[in-house]
Amino acid sequence: MTQKVVNFVGYSNSGKTTLIEKLIKILKCDGFSVAVIKDTHHDFDIDRPGKDTYRFREAGASQIVARSDQRWALLTETPEEKVSLTYLLSQLQSCDLVFVEGFKSETSAMLRLEVWRQENGFAPPLAEKDFSIEAVITDQKNSLNLNRPTLDINDPELIVSWILQYFQLKSI
């Protein structure tokens, strides 16, 4: 089965994470499974100094698996090169949809949706010049003239319906 990937692009603080969170909740209630891949431009750490996984990594382990009754995580050090989105997608278990956030320059074959809000004083929508963006999710639905769909950022149910229609998925 081909992965159904939605890449949410947009400027920092445009509301991508908040929107994705709302969409996941709706989709989960409708019986869909959703995975998320987040690219961050900041160094991040999911384990804390003094904890066992941190100590193993500091000692030089290239991979560490941490497991509890509720979840497990694989930590992999990648000092040589940044891992590609294609590789990260290949690591996911089967799911109905994959939401990607933070891969603004990634233009491979996937649905690209821009989240854009004028109230934050951002530059014009990326979609004005980036024709790989299929639709714009915005608070300025009626004032944009982009020759592609604009979806109301305040109507997450409509956005879910649009995504499901795009991929020809039906509620479970």
Image: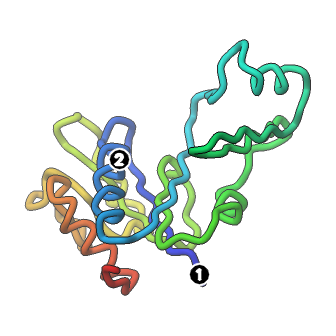
Q: Which residue is mark 2?
A: 16
Nearer the camera: disc 1 or disc 2: 1
Q: Is residue 152 above or below residue 167?
A: above
Q: Residue at x 31, y 58 (%)?
A: 23
The percent coordinates of residue 129 (x first, y second) are 38, 60
Looking at this rendering, what residue extends furthest in the left direction? 142
State the quadrant of the C terminus. Answer: bottom left
Residue type, numbered disc 2: Lys
Q: Residue at x 8, y 61 (%)?
A: 142
Verify CB contact (< 8 Å) between mark 1 and mark 2. Answer: no
Residue type, numbered disc 1: Thr
Q: In the rendered structure, which disc, 1 or 2, sits on the residue that comes first in sequence?
A: 1
Alpha carbon separation for disc pair 1 and 2: 24 Å
The percent coordinates of residue 130 (x first, y second) are 42, 62
> How many residues crowd around disc 1 within 10 Å: few (fewer than 14), some, or many (20 or more)?
few
Instruction: Report helix, strand or loop for mark 1.
Output: loop
Residue 2 is marked as: 1
Q: Quadrant of residue 46?
A: top right
Q: How many marks?
A: 2
> How many residues crowd around disc 2 within 10 Å: few (fewer than 14), some, or many (20 or more)?
many
Looking at this rendering, what residue extends furthest in the top direction? 50
Camera-side residue: 117 or 28?
28
Residue 77 is left or right of residue 134, and the answer is: right
